[in-house]
Image (cartoon, rainbow, N blue to C red):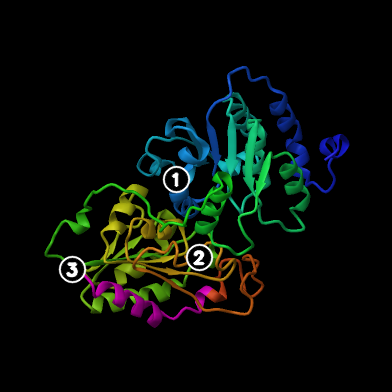
């Protein structure tokens, strides 16, 4: 890339230019501390973090650093889990949405990254945003900046081209839609020059028995996680209720979980009028939720962070998935799939739409490929998992 095209690149979005003075200032900021340590940029959600964790365990050996020399730069959404999931690694989290929208916050975070004096900065994410992940790697000004080849569209081609040209190494981890759990190990293969077989997705977690599981005489329970930050990925709540009724009829308890935004379901749960229907909506911290899911007979969940956490801690889990980027994150391939995992879907000709679905009446509706999953199919999957209890 020539000097002129580097300073005045073509095809960039207006926001890139608005943040250009910050990025230029950070790049020129003096850093007198000796270069040391490894920066790992993971600007993603809980589910993506769960899929990346196994490969991160190999980073000390792969990059020749001690665990204490690794800084994992992540998102606030999973900062409360860091101590359990990444022991010995320094974890720093940020508000990734503010970083890509707010001028002063971006300056603060980028300067902090620059002043750390990292020797190596890496990002192995395939689905990522240039104005977050790639710009943080760039801001580090580490002598070695290693990134994965990202998923590129016509809209993002110019920005990715600029950042990739400023990386010291770009690693191709496979074509779309290679699963993330496999990609992370392909990245390791390229870094180390030797093969690392993909590992089952597992998440270390504490052994804390929740009150729900402390009574050995009580019936086993099924967790119903019906929420999602993306309305389209929410299986219709009436379908969840249909499965809950089947569980209750079979003598199982049903635990409904969710944050405050799921409070709309409280009247319907109360209307079940059953002592085995337990409403915990808005009462559990994320750590408490993981404890509850870990000891469940089965977890039924939309494709959300909690659903992937349930899989990671080894809970028998039924995940209800659509086809927006089928195979990229879900379903898990056999090489990384935990025992007891079921991924239910209804294949449609419009799969791989990247969630730009034209078939919904409103943005609040479920994606048709998600809504089409039959409650009876879900109940059968639950039965297969709970009969072992």
As helix, strand or loop, the secondary structure at mark 3 comes to: loop
Q: CA distance from mark 3 to mark 1?
A: 31 Å
Image position, residue 198 (x, y; %) = 47, 57
Locate residue 375: give its quadrant: bottom left
Instruction: Reply above or below: 203 against 18.
Output: below
Instruction: Reply above or below: 55 against 280.
Output: above
Q: Earlier in the sequence, mark 3 or mark 1?
A: 1
Q: Are marks 3 and 1 in contact (CB under 8 Å)?
A: no
Q: CA distance from mark 2 to mark 1?
A: 20 Å
Residue at x-position 24% and y-position 79% = 249
Would you name the residue on which mark 1 appears?
Answer: 78
Q: Earlier in the sequence, mark 2 or mark 1?
A: 1
In the image, farthest residue toward the left: 217
Magenta-tinted stretch:
370-389
Task: Please state which of residues 170 and 99 is positioned toward the viewer in this rendering.
Answer: 170
Which is the main secondary structure of the residues drawn in magenta?
Answer: helix
Nearest to the eye among marks 2 and 1: give it: 2
Nearest to the eye among marks 3 and 2: give it: 2
Residue at x-position 21% and y-position 58% = 212
Q: Earlier in the sequence, mark 3 or mark 2?
A: 3
Residue at x-position 57% and y-position 45% = 191
Q: Is residue 93 visible?
A: no
Q: CA distance from mark 3 to mark 2?
A: 31 Å
- Mark 2 surroundings within 10 Å by alpha-carbon count, few (fewer than 14), some (14 through 19), many (20 or more): many
- Mark 1 surroundings within 10 Å by alpha-carbon count, few (fewer than 14), some (14 through 19), many (20 or more): some
Would you name the residue on which mark 2 appears?
Answer: 330
Q: Is residue 28 left or right of residue 112?
A: right
Instruction: Reply above or below: 154 against 169.
Output: below
Q: Is residue 305 visible?
A: yes
Would you name the residue on which mark 3 appears?
Answer: 219
Image position, residue 367 (x, y; %) = 56, 72
């Amino acid at each position: 890339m020539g000097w002129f095209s580097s300073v005045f690149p073509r095809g960039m979005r207006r926001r890139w230019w608005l943040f250009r003075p910050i990025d230029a200032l950070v790049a020129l900021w003096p850093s007198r501390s000796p270069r040391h340590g490894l920066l790992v940029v993971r600007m993603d959600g809980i589910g993506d973090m769960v899929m990346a964790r196994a490969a991160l365990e190999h980073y000390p050996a792969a990059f020749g650093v001690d665990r204490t020399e690794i800084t994992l730069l992540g998102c606030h959404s999973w900062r409360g889990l860091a101590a359990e999931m990444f022991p010995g690694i320094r974890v720093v989290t940020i508000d990734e949405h503010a970083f890509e929208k707010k001028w002063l916050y971006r300056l603060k975070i980028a300067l902090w990254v620059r002043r750390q004096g990292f020797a190596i900065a890496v990002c192995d994410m395939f689905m990522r945003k240039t104005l977050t992940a790639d710009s943080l790697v760039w801001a580090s000004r580490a002598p070695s900046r290693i990134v994965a080849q990202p998923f590129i569209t016509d809209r993002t081609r110019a920005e990715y081209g600029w950042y990739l040209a400023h990386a010291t190494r770009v690693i191709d981890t496979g074509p779309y839609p290679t699963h993330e759990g496999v990609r992370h190990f392909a990245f390791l293969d390229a870094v180390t020059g030797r093969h690392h077989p993909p590992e089952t997705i597992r998440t270390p977690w504490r052994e804390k028995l929740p009150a729900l599981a402390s009574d050995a005489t009580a019936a086993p329970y099924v967790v119903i996680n019906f929420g999602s930050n993306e309305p389209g990925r929410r299986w219709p709540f009436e379908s969840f209720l249909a499965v809950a009724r089947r569980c209750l009829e079979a003598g199982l308890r049903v635990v409904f979980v969710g944050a405050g935004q799921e409070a709309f379901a409280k009247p319907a749960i109360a209307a079940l009028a059953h002592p085995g229907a337990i409403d915990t909506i808005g009462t559990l911290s994320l750590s408490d939720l993981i404890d509850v899911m870990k000891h469940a007979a089965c977890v039924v969940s939309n494709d959300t962070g909690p659903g992937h956490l349930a899989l990671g801690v080894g809970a028998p889990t039924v995940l209800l998935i659509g086809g927006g980027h089928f195979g990229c994150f879900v379903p898990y391939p056999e090489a990384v799939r935990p025992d007891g995992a079921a991924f239910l879907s209804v294949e449609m000709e419009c799969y791989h739409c990247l969630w730009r679905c034209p078939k919904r009446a409103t943005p609040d509706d479920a994606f048709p490929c998600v809504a089409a999953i039959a409650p009876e199919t879900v109940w059968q999957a639950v039965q297969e998992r709970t009969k072992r209890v």
